[in-house]
Amino acid sequence: MKPESGRRMHREQHPSNKIIAEVAWMYYVRNLNQGEISDALSISRPTVISYLKLAKERKIVGIQVSPEHYRMNATADALKEKFGLESVHIVPAEGREGETLTRAVCEVAAHHLPDFLQQGDVLGVSWGQTVHFVSEFVPSWPIKDLTVRQLLGSLANPLLSTSESCTTEIARRLDARCITFNAPAVVSSAALATALRAEPIIRDQLEGIRCCNKSLFSLSPCTPDTHVVQFKIATVGEVESYRMRGAVGIIAGRFIDVDGKAVLGELDERLVGVDHDLLRSMKGLLVVSGSAKRDAVRAALRGGFANHLVADLELASLLLND
């Protein structure tokens, strides 16, 4: 072995802090890749990799996660443990509020949706502004043998985001089979609802909902401006009646109490669509933003309606600190 090559080998096997710091500076500060560093210093690429590892071991380099991202990841992990969730995605406000923040949360949820789904799934889709925003952001990502179903009947207000429009758009973007629900979401009497459910076409559609193994939904608190009032499913007085009996949240037109248990009333008898037990039997992706929905979200998580959550950081922190 020539003396010079022997000295080079010794230097590479027993490098000084100076050379390690130089490699770390070039990689982390100057943003040179490993090949460029190898050429600049006349050392092999494996040696560059080794030096970068030594830079951490000798504490020449320290890796620090920004406080905001650390808080998001720590909060997500804590929520998963607290509520037994499979995944939690948290979106920082970054100065956003209202609809702008909701859209940011929905965009994250939409890009998570293809990971939430897999071949052969049957996805049940609820309705409302949040689910509509999600449908707008879903990437074109074909999923083999996927079926997307509407979870409840049709709604009368053409200006609002119906379950049909959300279901159709999500199915289109995921190249899935789309099955809408050809019945009214709510009727004027319990007797009429019973008769409609007994009709063969509607009975088959209700049976089809039982095939859904996953769901996409949001929720709302029991306030006068709740989505069930906007969609003319319930009156302000009916919502108040449920609230007085302990309801804190509404999922797909169904009311739940603080523990996520069903709060039943006359309206339930007039609805045509998914019920509490069916919703709970599906693996749910809950998409929600806004601290005002804390009690409703907490109830849904306690009740086992969601296995996956996408929410904003402030709401997530409130849920964690209850």
Image: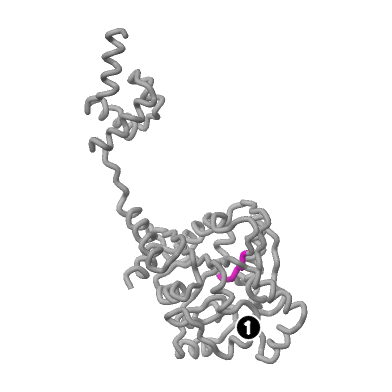
Q: Check the image and report above or below for 256 versus 149.
A: below
Front-lying residue, 158 or 14:
14
Return the x and y of residue 45 as percentages of the image width and height.
Answer: 39, 25
Q: Which residue does the image show at 59% across and 86% down from the upper left?
A: 268
Return the x and y of residue 288 as percentages of the image width and height.
Answer: 47, 67
Residue at which label 1 appears: 271
Disc 1: CA contacts within 10 A as few (<14), some (14-19) or many (>=20): many
Q: Check the image and report above or below for 164 versus 177.
A: below
Most extreme residue toward the front, as rendered?
1
Magenta range: 123-128
Q: How is the image coloured?
A: one colour
Look at label 1 and name its amino acid: Leu
Front-lying residue, 102 or 317:
317
Q: Check the image and report above or below for 53 versus 110.
A: above
Q: Quadrant of residue 161?
A: bottom right
Q: Which residue does the image show at 39% across and 58% down from the upper left?
A: 92
Q: Which residue does the image show at 29% across and 16% down from the upper left?
A: 8
